[in-house]
Amino acid sequence: MRGGRAGALAAAASAAFLMAAPVFLSTYGILILTEILTMSLFAMSFNLLFGYTGLLSFGQAGIFGAGGYLAVLSLLHGPSSLWSAFAAAFAGSAVLSFVIGWFCVRRDEIYFAILTLGFGMMLFTVAHNWRSVTGGSDGLGGFTLPPLDLFFWQGSLADPRHFYFLVLSVTVLGALLLQRMVDSPFGLMLRSIRENTQRLSFVGADVRAVRLCAFVVAGTLAGVAGVLFALFNRIASPEMLHWSFSGKAVLMTILGGSGVLFGPAVGAAIFYVLEHLITAYTTNWMIFLGAILIVLVLAFPRGVLGSLLFLAARSRGRPRS
Amino acid sequence: MEAFFANLLNGLSWGMLLFLISMGLTTVFGVMGVLNFAHGSLFMLGAYLCLQFVRWTGSFWTGLILGPPLVALLSVLVERFLLRPLYGKDVSLQLLLTFGLMLFLDDGVRLIWGAAYHVVHPPDALAGSVPLLSRSYPLYRLFLVILGPLVGIGLWAFFNFTLWGKLLRAAAMDRQMAEIAGVRVPLLFTAVFAFGAWLAAVGGALAAPHQSVGPAMGERIIIESFIVVVIGGMGSFPGAFVGALVLGLLHSFGTTFFPQLQMALPYMLLAAILLLRPRGLFGTES
Amino acid sequence: MKRKSFAPVLVLLVVVFFAGIGLAADKPVKIGFAYIMSGPFATYGQFAKQGAELAIDELNAKGGVLGRKVESFFEDTAGKPDVGIRVIRKHVFENGADVVMGLDSSGVASAVAPVMTELKTPLIITHAATPDVTGAKCNRYTFRISLNINQNIAMASAIAADMKAKTWTTAGPDYSFGHQSWEYFQKYLSRKKPGAVFLPQAELAFSPAATTDFSSYITKIMNSKAEGVLISLWGGNLIDFVRQASDMGFFDGKRDILMTLGAATEVLYALKDKMPTGIWVGTRYWFLANDTPVNKAFVEAFHKRYNAYPSYNAHGAYAAVKAYAAAAEKVKSTDKEKIVEGLRGLTLELPVGKITIRPEDHQALTDGAWGLTAADPNYPIRILKPIRRFTGDEITPPVAETGCKMN
């Protein structure tokens, strides 16, 4: 299924690009790339549920945002340490997604989507209304950036390039974890759930447990992405938890292709580049985004990366057949 | 007592407006299995067209009567050229396409009518208020309270007693069987989608004298109508009626009794109902 | 032939060289604006753009700033904090802005202001009213030219103190702006009128931003014991509230009413004669509040160009551009650090009146005006008559109260 030599080449090229980007990109380019990578991690976590398990979650942003808030709270009230902020968000979003997942994985399709939307919006309300703890609608900021303490090397998160490498490392780690998971027998189980829920339960697998497991992994990674996002913007804001932010992950995933692990990452890149290009010419960028989305859904239902890989596979397959 | 009565009327009138908006959504889902994200935008379009007709003719009624068919016409094109290629494919693609359509329409109205707030006045016959206990109550809201059930009963009768209505229900239950029986399902689907859009636009025109007309009105209503439809049971008319009433009353009494929770209340209700009755109050297990 | 052609080439080179130096000196001054340009609140971005462009054209017609042309960049914050931070970074790193201006939403302003210390670029806020950005979150680079919540509420409470109402409640948006407006109102009014009573939290009427049906909030207020109502709803919410409240008999003269942003022109243009008369309303700039030549010229130029009376957001952007130009002329430089020094303590005559940017918290001491809504055949919208004017000094809380610690 993976692209063989061409795939390896593409992977090597993108790895080289990402490693070397700070050398040739402008500061603003680095900032945008950092945001793309953060959103990639978020969208890939979403796609573990959507693309691989067939569960469309509109509440993913709730956990993403909760991760961000937990990190900021830990920085404000705990030690000024990057690692303890990550630990707080990691543990918190794991527990949170376990609780929410426990309810939601009982439902399918549209009902799962609406139920996760409901839970996500409850979290949004907490962030938006609990002013004494979360700062309310103005968000929670005012923390000092923790040092980037890598034991052997001291960096500064205020430096866009250092921050970039932090985000790159975390995102790559997350992607590798997802890849291992998807390629494992567990991943096979996820896909068979997507294809046929009943068949899997006939052979004795506990569908709910498998789904819940995927939900927790996806939620925890989303929480970690939320930490990066909050640190990047120096604030955790309620908008991060809103359903429309989940919609962004859905959009990026479909743009890139939900059937491929890196599809959402490609989708995130396309989304930001498109937004950047369109907003340079018009403030009516939503009309263009809407039109492009419609065309993509109709012409490339597999997403951009998905369609490319499909075409590549077909052109390779043709001589043989 | 007076407070209770006022809250009851507030909840009923808001609920009936929600019902009018949600009916199209639930029809389209029930028959076609399509969850239309752009439904709120069609609602908004109904309001804007009403505004435009009021500007041209000065009469609210022309806007109510002439606007919605135009929206239905637009949605025929949408169904024929955009939605039809996606039938039988993943549901998420339909959701995405209609999401794209929502972005397109919401920004489109801003191109045509600008971003400013617009106001449509209720028709003279329904303007003003009537005395109610020691207070007065807006006539237009009472009109909505009466209109909601009437339209609901009309639709119910249509689905149960007319040939077209029966065909629709047959196609919703089993598309293949209906096709074998000679029903031209594609045509039926186009008609249903247009009908749903017409209902949305009627809701929009009726909402115009009640709230300011602006590009955000569709986005604001769509999640609430999703909740109505899901609570009631997707595809169910009585469900949409009850769901809208519950949400309307929850809004009015929640404002009084649980002000801190009001933003979360609809979502809490939604989650509770989906967990206890997976297919909604009036939904049937498929 | 070859020898002949050498001299002209040399001349050309010299000309190009000096022209280059000339061009470098004439490099335009770049102003980056960040407003809501898309979505439901795009109308605020449009107003601001109108005001900004008018000011820039006026400057350029007189030779620009320090003899350099002024160039503008507009970016869309979409009203979202993360987008706001992104476009501010874009202005600084990509557009090479010498100064950034704008911000409509308090949420965006709260997110952006702390980032300015990293970007080391002056920011002049022209609309967002949260007290924090010139209070607890104040910093060297963040300034505000427009009225903030405290100042507007100080006027509201001064008017409330003269009213009959003793027990007060509020109808406001259920986010920081609404809650802060109410908190400051309680604080200021109880100072001016120690006997004032405020309803408990559960009896207030805070409505979520997406509310379109206000009937239950209106009922709640009408059923309460309150004799006075502070309404901090604004924009579309206020329009919906006023129309629905009129139909429900809310404006029956039985209660004292204050609308903190009722005199915003976008509201008055939408409501026209549906805005009840005889209601106390405030705004951040009222185009008829004073007769100074500066104001008259501004209103006239604005009306001539856009065929509408200037909204407070148009004035905010206009004022920020003029303040920047004044600061640059004062320190004879557009260096960002020097501009910061130039803006601190700057005094300047603007359409709204004479303002001073307080060096301790960077909030402009701006005159304000409230008034009673009235009909006037000369205007298509309700106007304020009579007007009650306040000076910046009397409505701005002392620095010690703002919580600002400038470093």
Image: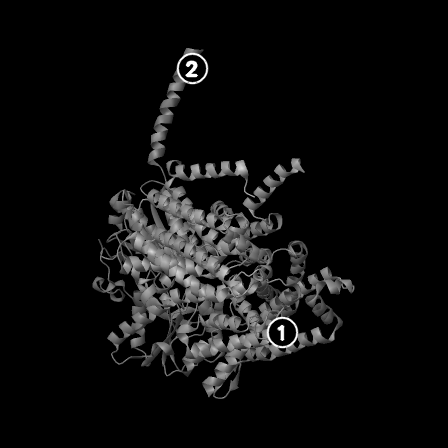
Amino acid beneath label 2: Ser
Of residue A42 and residue C6, the one placed in the foreground of this image is A42
Measuring 43% from the left and 53% from the top, which residue is drawn there?
C50
Q: Is B202 placed left or right of C58 in the picture?
A: right
Quadrant for residue B284, please give it. Answer: bottom right
Describe the element under mark 1 as helix, strand or loop. Answer: helix
Q: Residue furthest right?
A: B182
Amino acid beneath label 1: Phe
Measuring 45% from the left and 49% from the top, which residue is drawn there?
A40
> Residue under mark 2: which chain is it in?
C
* Above or below, comparing residue C390 to residue B102 in the picture: below
Q: Where in the figure is residue C361, as x and y percent of width and height?
A: 25, 57
Q: Where in the figure is residue C72, as x and y percent of width and height?
A: 40, 46
Quadrant position of the C terminus of chain B in the picture: bottom right
Residue tagged by mark 1?
A: B237
Describe the element under mark 2 as helix, strand or loop. Answer: helix
Of residue A65 and residue C52, the one placed in the foreground of this image is A65
Of residue C17 and residue C226, the one placed in the foreground of this image is C226
* Above or below, comparing residue A86 to residue C1 in the picture: below
Q: Is C365 placed left or right of C269 in the picture?
A: left
> Residue under mark 1: which chain is it in?
B
Q: Where in the figure is residue A22, as x and y percent of width and height?
A: 38, 39
Residue tagged by mark 2?
A: C5
Counting labels gives: 2
